[in-house]
Amino acid sequence: MEDPELASLQTVFETLRLASCQDPTVLKPAEEKLKEWEIVPGYYTILMKIILKHDIDLNVRWLAFVFEERVLTGIWRRNITNGINDAERMYYAKVSCATFASRFCRLPHKWLSLWQRSPDWTTLCEWPS
């Protein structure tokens, strides 16, 4: 069951934009909304799409990276409740490999951070070539 709010990449983008502002009255509710979406299927795919859009403000993309890190630090494992589903896992793997290898990757240090934090390198065997 997909949350209708997440159906739009624009909704997540706007929430990330609000979460990247300096005003605590705007920032806190936006961060809470982003955390609520962590268990919604499709959320991490949308975050990845935002990260890959180079025309989006770098601060928003950086914040998307911060939330995307949770994929590799917690929900990547298959045996946990509300873990990332196989379709998102394969999309993430495909895009991560292609983006990291791309000469257009503008945040290479952050990509390295994501790769280093992977809790289960055995899943790499399941990634598409």
Image (cartoon, grey):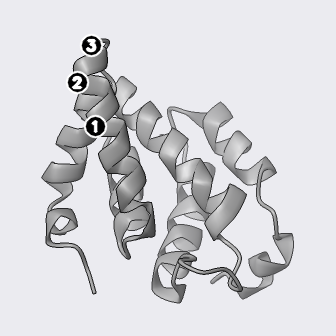
Nearest the viewer among 43 and 105 is 43
Nearest the viewer among 82 and 112 is 82
Q: Position of residue 86 (x, y in %)?
A: 54, 87
Amino acid type of disc 3?
A: Asp
Q: Residue at x 33, y 61 (%)?
A: 46
From the image, tell me which residue sits under label 2: 26
Q: Which of the 4 image quarters holds residue 83?
A: bottom right
Q: CA distance from mark 1 to mark 3?
A: 11 Å
Q: Position of residue 100 (x, y in %)?
A: 61, 51
Q: CA distance from mark 3 to mark 2?
A: 6 Å
Q: CA distance from mark 1 to mark 2?
A: 6 Å
Q: Which of the 4 image quarters holds residue 125?
A: bottom right
| Drawn side of residue 89 relative to residue 28, left or right | right
Q: Quadrant of the N terminus?
A: bottom left
Q: Residue at x 36, y 60 (%)?
A: 37
From the image, tell me which residue sits under label 1: 30
| Drawn side of residue 94 relative to residue 79, left or right | left
Q: Earlier in the sequence, mark 1 or mark 3?
A: 3
Is 15 drawn above or below residue 2 in the view shown?
above
Q: Which of the 4 image quarters holds residue 30?
A: top left
